[in-house]
């Protein structure tokens, strides 16, 4: 009897995401008392979402693989890694058998910490917890150590909560939120806030840069077409196609190869959100149930609600930065020494979210936001993103997420946007004996710089909120001269 | 089915309400809007509306016509969305599960 139960379990664990994720959602849904029919419908959607995701990834690789090979042989441009984008990346993470359970546990633990008064923020952004699970998964599948996995996850998660507490005062002052008690727990973007504050102080000291102020509206009008995923996908495909296949006076076959690639990438960009949406929709009943469970058990304590940075990106400066960072990130990918990741999935739609806290800490000045992104945030994202491809492949293999043959390595820009998670992973891989002392050094250096900058800027959000509120009454007009 | 509320179903029977087209938008068009979708559906059903919900990012607003109401988790929405003059209700409170906080606003804007 016991043996057959164990057999069922080992069969289950060897299944791919389309089977194991729905099963784990149903089990957790029952544990957290979600309505049964909703959980079942959600589980079904997730299974379909994963099937769609696999199909799309298959299509894109069969088109992009040959082109990347061509490019490598012709120009020595070595893109050994493909950036699959956050919708696919989060799909890979949710395919880790214990991912959903880990997220549910994080939220329950979060509620306990709020009740104890250790933190003030309750992170209800179920979906975006995947970044913590990603670095846990990277640690687990690379080192095999549960202890290190749990430590990496807990530290990364706790730092993000503390950061959300810390930036809370500036959110309402800057955005004039529709309700009280909202903060952002989006680890990818908020962990850049201390650096953003520091850079703002730094630019204030540089003559020439000090006085540059760019106006969001005109930029969006000029460059707005870059925002459409269909268009940007097509351009990326065409560009890669031309670089990979064209000779001077291209033949008909070369033109059709490039055009074919353009439409395939565009198709991928357009349909990928549908697959990701199915996965999120399938998760909704579970995340609802966890939220209800947690708030029901909470004593009447006051807390902030931690949400996705996506709720802020409607501000014109963020839209403009989102638009402008797309071509910049694409250029950086080709010019950045040490980058071997071909930008694709995340290049068009990611930086609008990630650059939020490197822009709003700079008074929404687009010029500074762009400078901060182009000089630091985007290069770092490429470096870490391509470095994490090894761990990403380990997760892919460990979870049975099927990549097409000869697909090469995968990773994503979005996992590169969290140096803190990366640093913790580096340190833990050294401790486990698979990392070099260089890995340890990089990890410790990142953590050290992060802690030092945060400490230096520790009073800044409160101060900044006061400045913002003061500015509203006096000379807001003066600061908008371009 | 509607036993508890006696006044409203009568109104519904008297004239068939025209179908309302409602956009539910968030930053990416993928995550936040998908998560609050079921709650928005429940609210609109409670109000007795016939409705169609179009989900998307705020950039998609311009690609649709005859929108009666924009529900959003993004605040503030970009100027060009606000300038369309379509009524907007911010539904961020739904992340707390607080349907009552937004219900009144939605009903009054839908008429």
Image: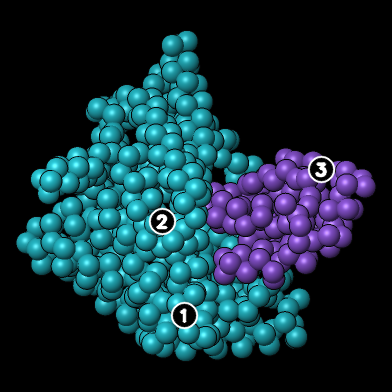
Question: Sequence-wise, which precedes: disc 1 or disc 2?
Answer: 2
Report the chain holding disc 3.
B
Q: Farthest residue in the right direction?
A: B14
In this view, the mark in front (2 or 3): 2
Callouts 2 and 3 on one subunit: no
- Examine the rendering and report whether any part of residue A252 can be seen: yes
- Residue, x 51% and y 49% (percent of image)? A38
* Chain with colour purple in the figure: B
Taking the spot 41% from the left edge, 66% from the top edge, the residue there is: A187
* Residue highlighted by disc 1: A298
Q: Crowding at label 2, few (<14), some or many (≥20) Cα neighbours within 10 Å?
A: many
Q: Which residue is mark 2?
A: A29
Q: Position of residue B35 (x, y in %)?
A: 55, 55
Q: Which label is found at residue B19?
A: 3
Estimate how packed mark 1 is, as few (under 14), some (14 to 19) or many (20 or more) residues with alpha carbons within 10 Å: some
Kindly tell me whether residue A420 is visible in this rendering: no
Chain for numbered disc 1:
A
User: Along the horizontal axis of the image, is A114 left or right of A145?
Assistant: right
Identify which residue, A457 or A368, lies in the foreground. Answer: A457
- Tell me if label 2 and label 3 are in contact, CB under 8 Å: no
Quadrant of residue A261 in the image? top left
A439 or A267: nearer the viewer: A267
């Amino acid at each position: 009897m016991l043996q057959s139960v164990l057999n069922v379990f080992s069969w289950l664990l060897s299944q791919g995401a389309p089977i194991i994720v729905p099963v784990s959602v149903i089990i957790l849904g029952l544990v957290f008392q979600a309505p049964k029919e909703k959980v079942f419908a959600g589980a079904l959607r997730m299974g379909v979402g994963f099937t769609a995701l696999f199909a799309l990834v298959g299509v894109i690789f069969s088109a992009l693989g040959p082109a990347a090979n061509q490019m490598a042989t012709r120009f020595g441009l070595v893109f050994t890694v493909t950036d699959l984008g956050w919708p696919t990346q989060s799909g890979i993470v949710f395919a880790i058998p214990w991912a959903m359970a880990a997220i549910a546990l994080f939220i329950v633990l979060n509620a306990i910490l709020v009740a104890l008064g250790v933190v003030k923020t309750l992170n209800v952004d179920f979906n975006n917890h995947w970044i913590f699970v990603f670095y846990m998964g990277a640690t687990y599948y690379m080192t095999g150590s549960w202890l290190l996995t749990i430590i990496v996850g807990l530290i990364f998660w706790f730092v993000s909560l503390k950061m959300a507490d810390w930036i809370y005062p500036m959110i309402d002052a800057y955005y004039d939120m529709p309700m009280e008690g909202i903060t952002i727990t989006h680890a990818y973007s908020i962990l850049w806030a201390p650096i953003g504050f520091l850079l703002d102080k730094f630019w204030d000291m540089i003559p020439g840069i000090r006085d540059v102020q760019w106006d969001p509206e005109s930029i969006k009008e000029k460059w707005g077409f870059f925002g459409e995923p269909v268009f940007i996908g097509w351009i990326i495909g065409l560009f890669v196609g031309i670089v990979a296949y064209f000779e001077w006076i291209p033949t008909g076959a070369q033109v059709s190869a490039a055009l074919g690639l353009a439409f395939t990438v565009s198709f991928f960009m357009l349909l990928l959100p549908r697959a990701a949406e199915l996965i999120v929709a399938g998760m909704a009943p579970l995340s609802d149930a966890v939220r209800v469970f947690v708030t029901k058990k909470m004593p009447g304590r006051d807390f902030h609600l931690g949400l996705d940075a996506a709720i802020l990106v409607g501000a014109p400066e963020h839209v403009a930065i989102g638009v402008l960072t797309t071509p910049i990130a694409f250029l950086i990918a080709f010019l950045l020494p040490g980058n071997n990741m071909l930008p694709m999935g995340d290049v068009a739609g990611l930086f609008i979210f990630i650059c939020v806290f490197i822009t709003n800490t700079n008074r929404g000045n687009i010029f500074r936001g762009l400078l901060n992104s182009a000089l630091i945030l985007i290069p770092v994202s490429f470096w870490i993103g391509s470095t994490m491809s090894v761990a990403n492949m380990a997760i892919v293999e460990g979870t049975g997420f099927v990549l097409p043959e000869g697909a090469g390595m995968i990773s994503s820009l979005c996992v590169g946007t969290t140096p803190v998670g990366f640093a913790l992973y580096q340190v833990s891989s050294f401790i486990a004996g698979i990392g070099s002392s260089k890995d340890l050094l990089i990890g410790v250096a990142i953590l050290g710089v992060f802690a030092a900058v945060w400490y230096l800027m520790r009073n800044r959000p409160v101060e900044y909120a006061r400045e913002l509120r003061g500015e509203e009454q006096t000379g807001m007009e003066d600061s908008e001269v371009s | 089915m509607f036993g508890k509320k006696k006044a409203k179903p009568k109104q519904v029977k008297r004239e068939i309400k025209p179908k309302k087209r409602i956009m539910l938008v968030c930053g990416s068009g993928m995550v936040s809007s998908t998560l609050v979708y079921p709650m928005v559906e429940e609210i609109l059903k409670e109000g007795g509306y016939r409705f169609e919900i179009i989900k998307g990012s705020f950039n998609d607003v311009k690609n649709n016509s005859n929108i009666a109401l924009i529900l959003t988790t993004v605040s503030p929405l970009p100027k060009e969305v606000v300038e369309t003059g379509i009524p907007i209700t911010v539904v961020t409170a739904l992340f707390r599960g607080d349907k009552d906080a937004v219900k009144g606003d939605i009903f009054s804007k839908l008429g």
